[in-house]
Amino acid sequence: MFETLSAPAPDKIFRLTGQFAADPRPDKVDLLVGIYKTAEGRTPVMGAVKQAEARILETQETKSYVSFEGDRAFIGAMRDLILGDAVPSARVAGVAAVGGTSALRQVLELVRTLRPAARVWVSDPSWPIHAAMVDHIGLARGTYRYLDRAANALDRAGMLADLSGVAPGDVIVLHGCCHNPTGADLDLGDWAEVAALCNRTGAIPLVDMAYQGFGDGLDEDAAGVRLLAREVPTVFVAASCSKTFGLYRDRAGVALIVTSEGAVAAAQGQLTAMNRNNFSFPPDHGARVVQTILTDAGLRALWEEELNSMRETMVQNRRALAEALRVETGSDRFGFLAAHRGMFSLIGASTKEVDILREKHGVYLVGDGRMNVAGLRASVIPKVARALAEVLA
Ligand code: LMR
């Protein structure tokens, strides 16, 4: 069966992690995978998570099955975190999934089942799995312009022009906040334009929410998805708890569908059946941790404090690197780093320049020049700035 095949190309984001680990240089810098690191370069379990886990360990009496859809209290807590009071809960169907990636997968498979002719529109650039997953499951894919590479900012006109061609029932993948890989986000006016476009064309937005709280704050980062939920009749949401709860390996996430109250039972049934067909029961541990944190005032306050501190570190890293680059280059060429939000920015490096940064300076970026700013820390910023200024001169 496999004799005539070769292995698929390694994952673009994780490809170099092994090489980084094997690199003997003590001053190497890992800016690859979207993982938050402290000033000491560690990714510790969050304090709120540790406390929630202790409580679960103490009180949990069974590991028996929960349900195909997952724990309703977790789904409800995530729905409220993301959608606030934008729509009544009676208009929202939801299931727990195997992290945010599988939430996306459940929604896209549902689209393929119910609307096989739909085209799924993905920003150029985007998180590589968006396009890969659409192709993998055999849906048609469209691409819309997103980044003005000269200005390193949202290409508003290009995005809206490309999306004006969508057909009724097509799906538009949007990043709720902290766009991966560009760091350039929609503002509220842009979200309103997207809502109007969906209503004009009959397209359905699918919001990938992986970084709520990493941009400007929990409510601020959800303002776009809430606007869509209020204004567009059907909205898909795929949300991840990996980064903002630091639960990467525990795989917690939700798929939500905002629809009319009359259609919610059908939507819920479709999502639940999709879980059953793909993995029966979503993992429970991470979901239970998140639910414990979000429904306990003390744990929630601690989590928000820790989340705020992660966000402030990222904003601070952005400012410090932009300033160091201003001094190194004598120009404002990298000023966009301070304006961007979230874990990532595209630094504007070619594949060859990314190779030189890695080989000569030990600075590891993803091949398209994506930098994980959450992997920076004060002690390495001068070195990274010098390397970028030299290689990208
Ligand atoms: C990233 O983009 O670095 C993360 O979302 C990790 C992943 O799964 O790609």
Image: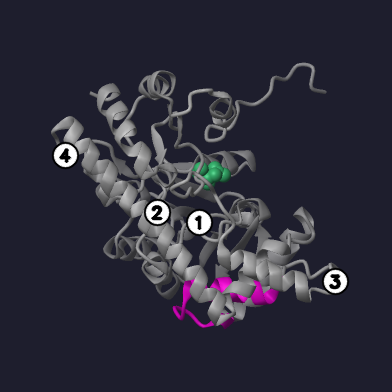
Q: Earlier in the sequence, mark 1 or mark 2?
A: 2
Residue at which label 2 appears: 178
Magenta highlight range: 71-90
Which circle, 4 or 1, is nearer the viewer?
Answer: 4
Tell which of 92 and 25 is nearer to you. 25
Image quarter hosting the C terminus: top left
Q: Secondary structure at mark 4?
A: loop
Indicate the amino acid at tag 1: Ala
Residue at which label 1 appears: 210
Q: Earlier in the sequence, mark 3 or mark 4?
A: 3
Q: Are marks 3 and 2 in contact (CB under 8 Å)?
A: no
- Residue 281 appears left or right of 385: right
- Residue 211 appears left or right of 348: right
Tell which of 85 and 38 is nearer to you. 38
Residue at which label 4 appears: 332
Dot 4, how many residues are within 10 Å of its Cα: few (below 14), some (14-19), or many (20+)? few
Which circle, 2 or 4, is nearer the viewer?
Answer: 4
Q: CA distance from mark 1 to mark 3?
A: 30 Å
Q: Earlier in the sequence, mark 2 or mark 4?
A: 2
- Residue 275 appears left or right of 144: right
Q: Secondary structure at mark 3?
A: loop
